[in-house]
Image (spheres, rainbow, N blue to C red):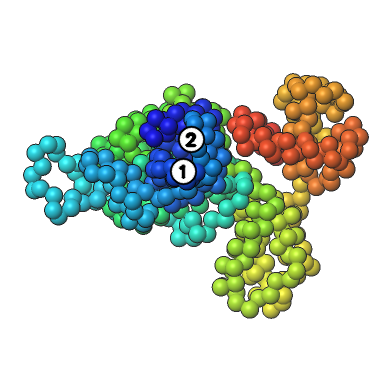
Amino acid sequence: MDDLWTGARSELEARVGTHNYVTWLAPLSLRAIDGGSADIACPTRFLSDWVSRHYARPILDALVHQGAEVERLSFTVAAPAPAVDNRPAELRPVDSIPRAVASPMPAAAPAAAPVAAPAPVRAPLRDEEMTAPLDARFTFDNFVVGKPNELAHAAARRVAEGGHVTFNPLFLYGGVGLGKTHLMHAIAYERQTRDPQARILYLSAEQFMYRFVQALRERTVMDFKELFRTVDLLMVDDVQFIAGKDSTQEEFFHTFNALVDQGKQIVISADRAPGEIKDMEERIKSRLSCGLIVDLHPTDYELRLSILQSKTEQFRQTYPGLRLGQGVLEFLAHRITSNVRVLEGALQRLFAFASLMGREIDLDMTQECLTDILRASDRKVTVEEIQRKVAEHYNIRLSDLVGPKRVRTLARPRQIAMYLAKQMTSRSLPEIGRRFGGRDHTTIMHGIRKIEELRTEDRSLAEDIDLLRRSLEA
Ligand SMILES: Nc1ncnc2c1ncn2[C@@H]1O[C@H](COP(=O)(O)OP(=O)(O)OP(=O)(O)O)[C@@H](O)[C@H]1O
């Protein structure tokens, strides 16, 4: 059984890539094979849900390939074997898995352990040490999950569960108002709820800098170092802020290394991928890149609509009895595409306005009340601009981008341009087709689907698209 699983694991690693393997599959083990079913142990319920939805096929294939007679998988939530204790691993529901971090010694432990001095038990951070107050609305329960943020959400849940996480740091990035801060607060809440003793420090990179400068001024750098290097979870928001600030970067680098060396978890957010942060030292970029990097993609229509539905439920508690007409949420999800903050602000304004006027929220009121937001959100980018930008980016001629040649060096950028045209303009598929040398709308649809598919598996393509989108929006 052990050999079988070892073989399957190597195969899985080769198939899904080391990052994915280490993050999702390394914590699994094979418990038994019985009657054509392989039972896989996962340390937490969340991991078991994620793996069964996303990795069941590769696991099954790998087992079969290793010669196992398996037709299906079952998943059992089983705690990992205790690190220092040789007792067999116990099977327990996820909620009863003991937390390892900074919990006090059990009462029954020998008073003076002869082997090694126990690590000092530190108190959880006081409010004033936490630096940035957490926003009570930013919880996992209030975070709506859709395709564009699915992986970021999953990785955040994984860190929030605590225990041994195989990626460090977790690096979340994405454009303005897409939920980075929300996810970071949610991690902090969840972790603190699961482990009240954990020392969790959440702050923006700007606050990190101010505290460092203050420590230099007040000659309390040792206290600063002591605080930052003794946390269990450090979360730094908007890390791009410290780019170009040499001594802050230096201190950040040492803090980062000290925590990673102690096996403490770090979560970082930024508005772009580590490699794209200008004026950030190379060694820091490379440190930031060595964990799991996940991208919060711009929202799609479905996600925007779900977010609006969820926020409407919340607003109904503040404005009970307000009626919402047919098609209002769909209209907003269609027209306000910039970011979730704007979407939320628009809905908030609508509810406040309708409650003042004592009227139902209908499409007329929506247009009247949100004229400025709707005007600002109107997509101004044209298909021609997109084509020019993409041609420039890939160093190809505009005439080739829209022309008939099918070689891959032209076809892929062409599909990217089609994809961006659909995402960033309100042109219909036939209209886009006309601007791409009179192509049929089904060709455009095929190109868009191809890019949607590739985006999820090809990181450099996804980064190219984000870069193009940002430069078009600028
Ligand atoms: N998936 C989501 N579900 C529910 N609310 C969301 C979601 N994504 C974003 N929001 C809400 O949108 C607002 C903006 O989110 P947030 O502040 O986390 O964005 P950000 O990515 O940190 O942006 P910035 O780059 O400006 O710091 C918040 O009120 C947040 O609750």
In the figure, is residue 127 to the left or right of 179? left
Quadrant of the snapshot with the N terminus: top left
Residue 2 appears left or right of 117: right
Residue 237 - label: none
Q: Disc 2 or 1, which lies upstream in sequence? A: 1
Whether residue 123 can be seen here: yes
**Residue closest to the eye, 138 or 132:** 138
The location of residue 282, given as percent across then percent down, is 47, 23
Furthest toward the front, the residue is 35
Quickly name the residue at label 1: 38
Label 2: few (<14), some (14–19) or many (≥20) C-alpha neighbours in 10 Å: some
Front residue of this view, candidates 303 and 378: 303
Question: What residue lies at 76% left-to-right and 23% top-to-bottom?
Answer: 408
> What's the residue type where badge 1 is placed?
Ala
Place of residue 304 in the rendered image (x, y in percent of width and height, measured from the top left):
66, 55
Picture quadrant of residue 260 = top left
Residue where numbered disc 2 is placed: 68
Residue 58 is situated, as x and y percent measured from the top left of the image, at 55, 36
Q: Are marks 2 and 1 in contact (CB under 8 Å)?
A: yes
The answer to whether residue 268 is above or below residue 366 is above
| Nearer the observer, 119 or 95 | 95
Q: Secondary structure at mark 2?
A: loop
Residue at disc 1, secondary structure: strand
The reply to whether the residue tagged 1 has its Cβ within 8 angstroms of ligand 1 is: no
Quarter of the image that includes the C terminus: top right
Label 1 CA crowd tier, 10 Å (few <14, some 14–19, many 20+): many
Query: Left or right: 54 with respect to 131?
Result: right
Q: How far across and down, in percent of the image, does residue 443 sit?
A: 84, 36
Q: Is mark 2 within 8 Å of ligand 1?
A: no
Instruction: Determine the residue positioned at 23% across, 47% down.
Output: 122
Query: Mark 2 belongs to which amino acid?
Result: Ala
